Image (cartoon, helix red, strand yellow):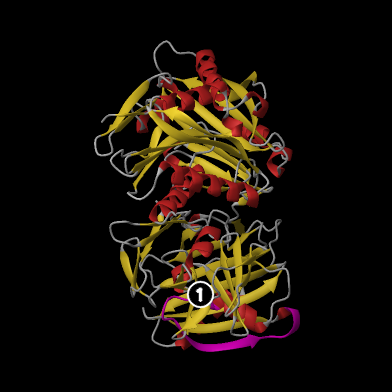
Amino acid sequence: MLHKGKGFVMLLLTVVLLAVSAIPAYADEAPGKTEIRLKVGSKQMKINGESVSIQPPYQESGTVMVPLSVFTNKKGFGAKVQLTNNKIIKLTYGTHTIVVTLGSKDATIDGKKTTLPVAPASKQGVTMVPLSIIAKSFEATLAKDAATQELVLKFVSVNDKSAGGKNIDTDAGKSKIGDSYYGWSMNYPTGLTMSSQTQDGDIVVFEDVKKEYYLAVIVEEAKDKLTMEETRNTIYGYFDEGEKVVDKKTVGSGAAAYERVTTKNKGGFFFEYRGIQANDSLYIVIFGKKAKTAQELAKSTGLLDSFRTAFNRSDVSVKDLTQIVNGLKTFADEDYGLSVKLPKEWKTDTEASIPWFYLEDSGYLYLDVTSLVPGDTLDEWIKRKQARFEQTFATAFRKEPEIKNVVWNGVSAKLMKLAYSWDTEKWWEEYEIFAIEGEYRYYTELAYPKDSPAAQSNLLDNVLRSMKADFATVESNFGELADELDNIDRSAVVTRTSEKYGYRITLPQYWTGDKKSLEETEMEYTTTGVGAGVNYWEDESVTFSELTSTIDDYYKELSGKNSKIKIIENTTVQFAGFTAKKVVFEDKTNNKDSTPYRITNYFVLKGDKVYNVWGFYYLANASDFNVKNMEAALSTFAFTR
């Protein structure tokens, strides 16, 4: 009977399966997040190092529960919250909306019904919600700092993009401002400067030099008629911490009615909020000033009263602040002198070290600039790139590249079209533009699913037409930019040795270490879609017969639960000089959380030490090159003592 041994086997088998999800997907190995740290039982969380007091998180049924403020604090996510009937909570962050109910595991995430692991609860008057599922839905990564035991959230704020100090008073002949896309206009806020604007233009903020006046216009989608409570609750979501309501009322009646809320914050500011619904939108206009009483806001009533939920395109006195023209908005990167027009739904990845733009799960575009190696040519560069593509994907999962001449950014360039799939049913199209100018190479990559809206919108033509990079700016801002990926010898290998656990293994040198230390119990090296690793544990009680029996039971149970899992091979072999259990299995589950893959496992019992040597590849990446590399790596495993 197995005790400790069986538990460890089950655990390590599970670890190998989990490792699959960490293998990178294909993008030819491309390159300031906000960080929140918190700990179960601690009354403090840190947002970018700044401590904030919170209700202590706790753990229930394996799920960490945190106060709602983890997601609503404006220094972090700044998610908007709306409460209905004192129990239904609606969280909005960027394009994501989550609706949960106190005491219920039922929830809706981006319109899809789901079940929470633990129901939201009220603890000492503070709403507590499950951390992991909300963080994931808001596109944040969640990890644990082993040294401090803190839970670490990292994400890119949806409001990171700033317009940065445009003085609107310099527009001669303009007496109004507005946004033609969102359909609003109002009188010029004289003496104020536009201090920030979101990339979509749905939030624009103005301030004076002394920071004593504040004006903001916010636009949210609101197709259904909102109640007074719903409008006010939306307004409340924009309050500063500790901001107090001093007056609230409904002004006017019928279609002209709006909600007005007057507040005072801790910094000596009084604010007037107006919530106006029109054009399938909710417009929130905020005016604030440093004052002793709320009555001082009355001096600016004329500015607020000038707000209109309409934009007159023929009125030349209106300064159009819109970021979206004909459904497109301009993205820019000053370091490269770069600008490109993309559909309004696209976003900037501010975490990336190169200009990178994306449409959630539906496409991306990036520019990578590297130094030109003397003697290199466009054709040779493309040949190397094509060879890597063919080495990465199995024949059935890729299509023959198409190459043609194009003009990019005013210079002659070449375009290579690639197509690849993870299941031979859904295909991605990738367009790679190669250009050389001066001492630098310019590589642009645009990719999206074949059946996506991006594929139907002439996006490639738009990129070729609108994408501009300033060569002089690049030359002045950058020095030597070697392309390590292009210049690497993919045939080179390196032998890695574990002194502590007494083994060595030879791996392709270009594989990277996800768990690179061989002095730990788990080692793992991978590249796109393929990898290998070693897991180690000790068990004085287990025999080889018991070990193989446990393994058989595990895989029998695994394949019994999922018809997509197939055991390819289950036998006893000689491996690294020992009798070993070999199991090869495939999982053809294909959904958003899993891509079809194959794992080869060797289990060796050496005294009281168990070694699990494994290799992995996605079926889409089962090219001769990848499979040979993986099998060669496994064959080199040897004991050193």
Q: Position of residue 128 (x, y in %)?
A: 48, 76
Whether residue 243 is in magenta: the answer is: yes
Horizontal placement of 565 versus 629: left or right? right
Magenta span covers which residues? Answer: 236-255
Q: Is residue 120 above or below residue 313?
A: below
Q: Residue at x 64, y 62 (%)?
A: 110
SS class, disc 1:
strand
Q: Position of residue 100 (x, y in %)?
A: 60, 73
Nearest the viewer among 135 and 264 is: 135
Q: Disc 1 residue type? A: Phe
Q: Residue at x 47, y 41 (%)?
A: 333
Q: How many marks?
A: 1
Q: Residue at x 60, y 55 (%)?
A: 322
Q: Residue at x 24, y 35 (%)?
A: 499
Nearest the viewer among 237 and 108 is: 108
Q: Crowding near pointer 1: few (<14 within 10 Å), some, many (20+)?
A: many
Q: Is residue 113 above or below residue 495?
A: below
Nearest the viewer among 478 and 591 is: 591
Nearest the viewer among 455 and 128 is: 128
Residue 307 visible (yes or no): no
Horizontal placement of 71 versus 523: left or right? right
- On the image, numbered disc 1 is attached to which residue? 287
Whether residue 100 is in magenta: the answer is: no
Q: Position of residue 437 (x, y in %)?
A: 47, 21
